[in-house]
Image (cartoon, rainbow, N blue to C red):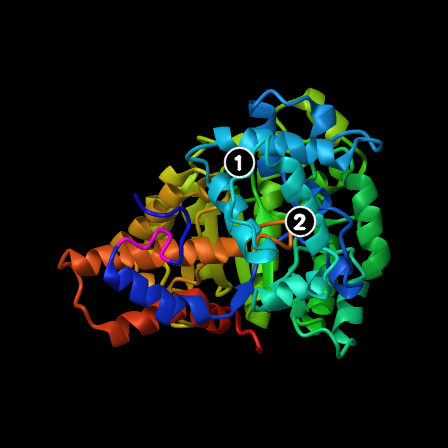
Amino acid sequence: MKQFMDDNFLLETETARRLYHEHAEKMPIIDYHCHINPQEIAEDKRYDSITDVWLGGDHYKWRAMRCNGVQEADITGAKDTDPYRTFEKWAETLPRAIGNPLYHWTYLELKKYFGITEPLNAKSAKAIYDKCNARLKDADMSVRGIIDQSNVKLICTTDDPVDSLEWHKKIKADPTCKVKVLPAFRPDKAFNIHKPEYPTYMAKLAEVSGVEIKTFADVVKALYNRIDFFNEMGCRASDHALDYAVYAAADEAELDAIVAKGLAGGAITVDELNKYKTACLLAVAKKYTEYGWVMQIHFGCIRDNNTTWYNKLGPDTGFDAVSNTHGADDLGKLMDAMSKAGNLPKMVLYSLNQYDNETIMTLAGAFQVDGQCASQIQMGSAWWFNDTKTGMEKQLTDFANLGVLGNFIGMLTDSRSFLSYTRHEYFRRILCNWIGNLVENGEYHADMETLGQLVEDISYNNTVKFFGFDV
């Protein structure tokens, strides 16, 4: 029986072990999509307890605890909930989560940052809790310390167009901060015209952009103003969360009427929403192309399904699910409209439904014609519910089957926790094992020089080139 999570964890062959230890392991990390708070980097935050840094905002763990029958008060809790009690409930849940990637993520984090390798369970919970809290007091366990020991060179946060980016400015001006932190443009609130908060949000956008918003042209002008500002702040990427891939053409008069209705708080139909979102996507794609930004689109998610608990806890608290809405035709039409207008930016496409992988890859292959860069349209890493060992293996297989895997830009954390950088290690081990199995099975030449370069590129180099990062 193999030892649990030893140095060759997940590396089944000699080829895999060489590729990981000689190549992947040494490469720095670029976390080009995450949800961490830049203020915590600027202030070099320190955490009082492992519960705070590990469980405070991790809806992956929250879902698992709910599945294990833990009361909500012990998960997201009241303000006076004992932090140890939440940790204890996680410790009781973890041993039962066999086969769940959370099991591997947990022990990768415990091992790397806290030197803990023994099982976490109800019996060991208090001792491990105390050991972790003691370790958090060490000098290298501040936010920047965690980033530094993780070998992270650059982070892209996720930022709203109305954000002042004040914390990015402070980080940029601080010579003691080693990591580069760039904003990423996330204009979802400006696109969600069907939401009740749309009029209030657009008033904020009008204020920060200096553009009075009455027509669709005004919406575009305001967004362009903020894109210009983000570009000045070093932004190289945008991100769009769509429930489904969308395309519905509309003329200017239709769009103006839809905007007027949305600003007045009127009920927006699905057809109106689709037309508005399509027009917004086409408009910003033009500006992204001008600046050479990467346009990321996430789709295939049914959000906030449990309205009772959504109303209590808000978004991103663990009540989302995988959608079966396909939308292949609309995604293709959207990309074609961008291409015909000469405004097809570099794109990364993610679907929460893994059965969309082939659609994404074949559509990407239909638009690799402008020569901006290698694989200028590509499928993103296995996202969210697919961020598992089998999900990553399927994503690699589908990418390789229908594209050029050597151009893949690799892993991201998509996380709110600074301990999540071990997900890059998890991915790299799976990548090296996947490649190693092909080699050992006689399906790829045992050319270690070429293979080593390929692994280093997917781990780091491709990301630098694709986004145009200065690191």
**Which SS type dominates the magenta stretch?**
loop
Image coordinates for residue 320, horizontal then vertical, percent: 58, 32
- Given residues 324 and 427, the one toward you in this image is 427
How many tags in the picture? 2
Q: Residue at x 59, y 32 (%)?
A: 123
Residue 47 appears in the rendering: yes
Image coordinates for residue 171, horizontal then vertical, percent: 76, 70
What is the secondary structure assignment of the residue under circle 1?
strand
Q: Residue at x 35, y 67 (%)?
A: 455
Hey, what amino acid is under mark 2?
Answer: Cys
Image coordinates for residue 94, horizontal then vertical, percent: 53, 33
What is the secondary structure assignment of the residue under circle 2?
helix
Q: Work out which quarter of the rendered image holds the N terminus and state it.
A: top left
Q: Which mark is residue 132?
A: 2
Q: Work out which quarter of the rendered image holds the C terminus and state it.
A: bottom right
Asked if the stretch drawn in magenta spans residue 11, the answer is yes
